[in-house]
Amino acid sequence: MSAVNNSSEDQLRAEIQELKRQLEEHKQKPAAAPSSGTFTVVLLVVLALAVAGYFLGYAPRLINVASGQALEVYGGSTSNGAKVDQWPYSSGANQQWSVVQVSAGVYNLKNVNSGEMLDVIGGNTANGTLMDQWPSSGGTNQQWKFQ
């Protein structure tokens, strides 16, 4: 884990606080059918938890707020292209993700078991695109940030 200067750390803490505020605001809205917006909120929470883990020096488990299940590489696979899904937490390394800073406010999520990155398949930008694990490519389809 590389050292992060205090201003970057402060910026990330501020981003996490903003995400918490947005989540609370979202919770107060009337319930509706799941949408891509719901997925976005959940993904932002997952990334906030991952960044928090980065500063604490451990690989956090990323738990979905709606299901209570962990983000994992299916079956503990170490193969390129193995699918990423959710499953009840079992403390497996395939359910642990380290946060790797790429640039200011931009991160890769690296699976502890395989060493591969959380990857949007084929760099596709369409709604509902699935994710898998893939070796680090430097592509933006493996980069995550808070907004």
Image (cartoon, rainbow, N blue to C red):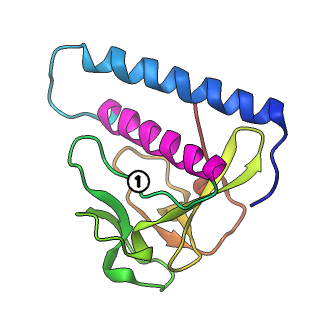
Query: Which residue sits at x=61%, y=50%?
Result: 56
Asked whether, in this view, residue 90 is left or right of residue 62, the answer is: left
Q: Position of residue 5 (x, y in %)?
A: 85, 39
Q: Position of residue 99 (x, y in %)?
A: 62, 56
Query: Which residue sits at x=46%, y=37%?
Result: 44
Residue type beneath disc 1: Leu
Closer-to-camera residue (80/128): 80
**Quarter of the view holding residue 87:** bottom left
Query: Which residue sits at x=69%, y=44%?
Result: 106
User: Looking at the image, which residue sits at the far front?
Assistant: 56
Closer-to-camera residue (102/60): 60
Rendered-image quadrant of the N terminus: bottom right
Q: Position of residue 31 (x, y in %)?
A: 15, 21
Closer-to-camera residue (93/86): 93
Rendered-image quadrant of the C terminus: top right
For mark 1, give the secondary structure.
Answer: loop
Write down the residue under mark 1.
62
Asked whether, in this view, residue 72 is left or right of residue 112, the answer is: left
Query: Which residue sits at x=37%, y=44%?
Result: 127
Magenta stretch encompasses residue 13: no
Range of magenta residues: 37-56
Magenta stretch encompasses residue 38: yes
Q: Position of residue 22 (x, y in %)?
A: 43, 19
**Quarter of the view holding residue 145:** top right
Q: Residues within 10 Å of mark 1 (few under 14, many from 20)?
A: many
In the rendered view, would you say 79 is above or below 144?
A: below
